[in-house]
Amino acid sequence: MSKRTKKVGITGKYGTRYGASLRKTVKKMEISQHSKYTCGFCGKESMRRTAVGIWGCTKCKKVVAGGAWVYSTTAAAQVRSQVRRLREMKEQ
């Protein structure tokens, strides 16, 4: 079977509908949504999206709450760093 999409990739299913800029935005979201991420528990690249905000590891079967389209959001990373900083201040 020949390759049918060169530029549009995963958003080829939308055809010419919805406009090019919207399809580019959706393409970025859908690629991050369907890709695999590294599991924080077992270290393997097997964390997949189960539902909106629910991410499950296919190897160790751990289930984690995360972002809607990406495993870890920027806001979650900021909170994690603040919690780590406050925990270090408390220990001193």
Image (cartoon, rainbow, N blue to C red):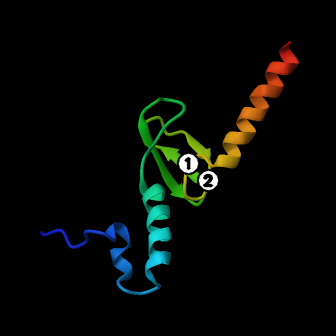
Picture quadrant where residue 59 is located: top left
What is the quadrant of the N terminus in the image? Answer: bottom left
Q: Horizontally, is 51 left or right of 46 in the view?
A: right
Q: Horizontally, is 51 left or right of 76 in the view?
A: left
Point out the residue furthest to the bottom here.
17
Mark linked to residue 71: 1
Point out the residue furthest to the front here.
21
Q: Hey, what amino acid is under mark 1?
A: Tyr
Residue 50 in picture, x, y percent from top left = 51, 55
Q: Horizontally, is 62 left or right of 79 in the view?
A: left
Residue sitting at x 81%, y 23%:
87
Q: Nearer the viewer, residue 7 or 86?
A: 7
Q: Hey, what amino acid is under mark 2?
A: Gly
Mark linked to residue 67: 2
* Whole-number angstrom distance, CA of label 2 to CA of label 1: 5 Å
Residue 36 to residue 15: above or below: above
Residue sitting at x 70%, y 48%:
75
Q: Secondary structure at mark 2?
A: loop
Q: Secondary structure at mark 1?
A: loop
Residue 88 to residue 25: above or below: above
